[in-house]
């Protein structure tokens, strides 16, 4: 994509370099425009080196040739301001361009993403909030700020959002919000079935797929409830539209899923649920001398199969099937047995499938369609999977 990154003068300006570096590495063309205030915090040379293009600061600078603000306004597909200070936001909200960046903003029509960063008191000032509300009403996407420690040492809402999260927000800015108004439930991660407080039956699933499916649904406009095992949410900043509910065991997960499923239209079950649990679980840590020679296990509920029984044909149900052999045939069997609309089958093994390695999968739907995806990461896989799910969801009416 062709992206204008505007940098205004705040201490978080150095983080704009991380955003630009990441955008360039992900194949985007980036044109930087800085305010004079930003130049006090970070040199244009840094951005010039990262983006491979001359940086514009003054109205008289012409990084794209004569009348740069008009040319760049036509050139860009997305415009981002990172960090956005009180000053630049008020100039935009009031329509008072005095620098190359705000002039360019006014000659540009297209998605705008603004990532504010400032002292919490400045963020909460009524004028700032008024200007932010005005910009939001113009369809500007305001990403952050987030809570935490700010440069002065104070705590509060004012920190720039995590650069990696911002990059994703920028990439999603021009994509239609196909899941807007839709509630989605995602299960993710491995469950833990404790023998005692410090030992458990679990599996190597990291929870990455569920995290990415939840994030992508939120970026597509859905409200998401993400129910996950103990390590299922450790992959970065969660989208504010995702409500994360951590659980431990399969029975906990079933309980929460059952509580919330009534309000959702789509269920995506990526969780690697343990099929069985120790029948008995000790309250205290077992000592070596107490460990029995064998351990009786009990089957766990199959959460998705139960959902299929109750809601098959009424809600859009998506399963994931990690398989070591007969990948497609086994997954197809589960699609039918659990009354699903779609199953995403993927081969797993020692070096395949778990974590964020290359991700190969086949999206099998109940009409017999089969779409293969071979992606370099689960982040990209999640985008491709949702693209297909949105098409399939659109083919049938659901509550
Ligand atoms: O384990 P299995 O291959 O049958 O998993 C297929 C699908 O069923 C996955 O979507 C998984 O999240 C779900 N499942 C479940 N509860 C279980 C076992 C599996 O929800 N106890």
Image: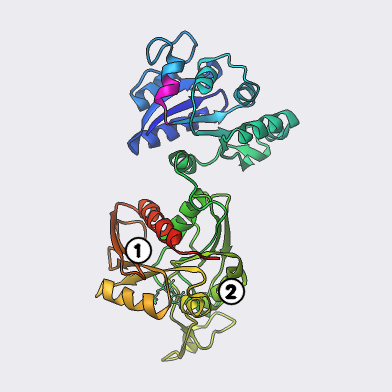
* Residue in view at x 48 percent, y 77 percent: 308
Quadrant in which residue 25 is drawn: top left
Q: Which mark is residue 241?
A: none
Quadrant of the image containing the C terminus: bottom right
**Residue extent of the magenta highlight:** 72-77
For disc 2, the neighbor class at 10 Å (few under 14, some 14 to 19, many from 20) is few
First reached walking from the N terminus: tag 2 or tag 1: 2
For disc 1, the neighbor class at 10 Å (few under 14, some 14 to 19, many from 20) is many
Quadrant in which residue 324 is drawn: bottom left
- Secondary structure at badge 1 equals loop
- Give me the C-alpha separation between circle 2 and circle 1: 27 Å
Quadrant in which residue 54 is drawn: top left
The x, y position of residue 337, in whole percent, is 39, 81
- Secondary structure at badge 2 equals helix
- Residue 75 in the magenta stretch? The answer is yes
- Above or below, comparing residue 34 to residue 243 in the picture: above
Q: Is mark 2 within 8 Å of ligand 1?
A: no
**Residue topped by disc 1:** 354
Q: Which mark is residue 258?
A: 2
The x, y position of residue 384, in whole percent, is 36, 53
- Residue 245 in the magenta stretch? The answer is no
**Can the viewer see residue 56 in this picture?**
no
Residue extending farthest left:
326
Locate residue 327 relative to residue 224 in the image: left or right.
left
Residue extending farthest top:
60
Quadrant of picture, ligand 1: bottom left
Quadrant of the image containing the N terminus: top left
Task: Name the foreground residue: 94 vs 7.
Answer: 94
């Amino acid at each position: 994509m062709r992206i204008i990154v505007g940098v205004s003068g705040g201490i978080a300006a150095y983080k704009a370099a991380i955003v630009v570096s990441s955008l360039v590495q992900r194949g985007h063309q980036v044109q930087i425009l800085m305010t004079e205030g930003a130049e006090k915090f970070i040199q244009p040379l840094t951005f010039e080196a990262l983006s491979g293009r001359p940086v514009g600061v003054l109205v008289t600078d012409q990084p794209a040739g004569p009348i740069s603000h008009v040319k760049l306004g036509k050139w860009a597909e997305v415009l981002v301001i990172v960090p956005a200070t009180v000053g630049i936001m008020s100039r935009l909200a009031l329509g008072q361009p005095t620098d190359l960046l705000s002039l360019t903003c006014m000659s540009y029509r297209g998605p705008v993403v603004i990532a504010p960063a400032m002292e919490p008191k400045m963020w909460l000032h009524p004028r700032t909030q008024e200007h932010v509300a005005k910009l939001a009403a113009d369809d500007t996407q305001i990403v952050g700020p987030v809570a935490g420690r700010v440069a002065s040492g104070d705590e509060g809402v004012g920190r720039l959002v995590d650069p990696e999260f911002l990059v994703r927000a920028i990439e999603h800015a021009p994509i239609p919000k196909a899941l807007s108004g839709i509630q989605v439930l995602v299960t993710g991660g491995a469950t833990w079935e404790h023998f005692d407080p410090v030992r458990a039956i679990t599996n190597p699933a990291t929870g990455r797929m569920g995290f990415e499916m939840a994030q992508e649904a939120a970026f597509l406009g859905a409200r998401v409830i993400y129910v996950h095992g103990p390590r299922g949410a450790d992959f970065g900043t969660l989208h504010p539209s995702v409500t994360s509910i951590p659980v431990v065991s399969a029975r906990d997960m079933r309980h929460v899923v059952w509580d919330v499923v009534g309000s959702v239209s789509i269920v995506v079950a990526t969780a690697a649920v343990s099929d069985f649990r120790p029948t008995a679980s000790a309250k205290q840590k077992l000592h070596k001398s107490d460990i029995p020679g064998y351990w009786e296990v009990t089957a766990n509920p199959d959460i998705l199969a139960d959902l299929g029984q109750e809601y098959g044909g009424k809600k859009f149900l998506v399963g994931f099937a990690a398989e070591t052999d007969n990948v497609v045939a086994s997954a197809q069997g589960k699609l039918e047995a659990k009354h699903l609309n779609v199953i995403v089958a993927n081969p797993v093994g020692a070096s395949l499938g778990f974590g964020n390695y290359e991700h190969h999968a086949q999206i099998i739907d109940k009409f017999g369609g089969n779409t293969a995806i071979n992606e370099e990461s689960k982040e990209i896989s999640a985008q491709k999977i949702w693209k297909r799910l949105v098409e399939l969801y659109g083919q049938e009416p659901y509550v």
